[in-house]
Image: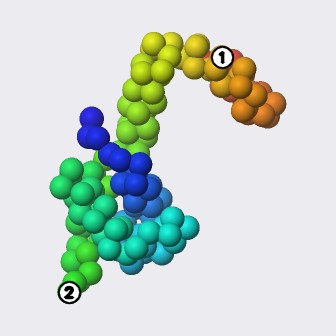
Amino acid sequence: MIKISNAELEVLKVIWQLKEATSLEIIKHLQHCNWNANTIRTLINRLITKKAIGISKREGKTYTYVPLIDEKLYKQKRAKQFIDQFHNGSVRDMLLTFVESGDLSRDELEKMMELFDKR
């Protein structure tokens, strides 16, 4: 799996959300990060180099970027890595950690139980 930094992932999330985006659109969506526009452009270029995003069209100096990585598949692989790294591959242990930490609301727990029941 391609190694994507947390900052690069923020850019990729915007492109996943918009389906395609120009650098100006990405910059606008990442205003909350307080990153310089050049920093965001650097992150875009890194994602292109890693083949995580591609260019779908060019109009003058404006490029439109699209994801080359499937969001759902990427999340599944990252989740598996997390579980393997911190919970010895045990989903049960991971869930117990979250439940015991108190970070899950009753509503979230009930929704999880509904999902378990459906499977």
Q: Which mark is residue 22?
A: none
Q: Is residue 81 left or right of residue 50?
A: right
Quadrant position of residue 42: bottom left
In the foreground, 35 or 1: 35
Q: Amino acid at mark 1?
A: Leu
**Where 51 falls versus 78 (above or below)?**
below
Q: Secondary structure at mark 2?
A: loop
Q: Is residue 88 left or right of residue 21?
A: right
Q: Secondary structure at mark 1?
A: helix
Answer with mark 1 or mark 2, whichever residue precedes in sequence. Answer: 2
Residue at the extreme bottom: 60
Q: Estimate the spatial distance between the alpha carbons at disc 1 and disc 2, rounded to whole Å.
A: 53 Å
Q: Position of residue 11 (x, y in %)?
A: 40, 59
Residue at the extreme right: 106
Q: Is residue 30 left or right of residue 42?
A: right
Q: Which residue, given by chain and number where applicable, does mark 1 sit on?
A: 96
In the rendered image, is residue 11 in sight? yes
**Where 101 falls versus 56 (above or below)?**
above
**Where 50 falls versus 41 (above or below)?**
above
Position of the N terminus, as image quadrant, is top left
**Where 58 falls versus 39 (above or below)?**
below
In the rendered image, is residue 80 in sight? no
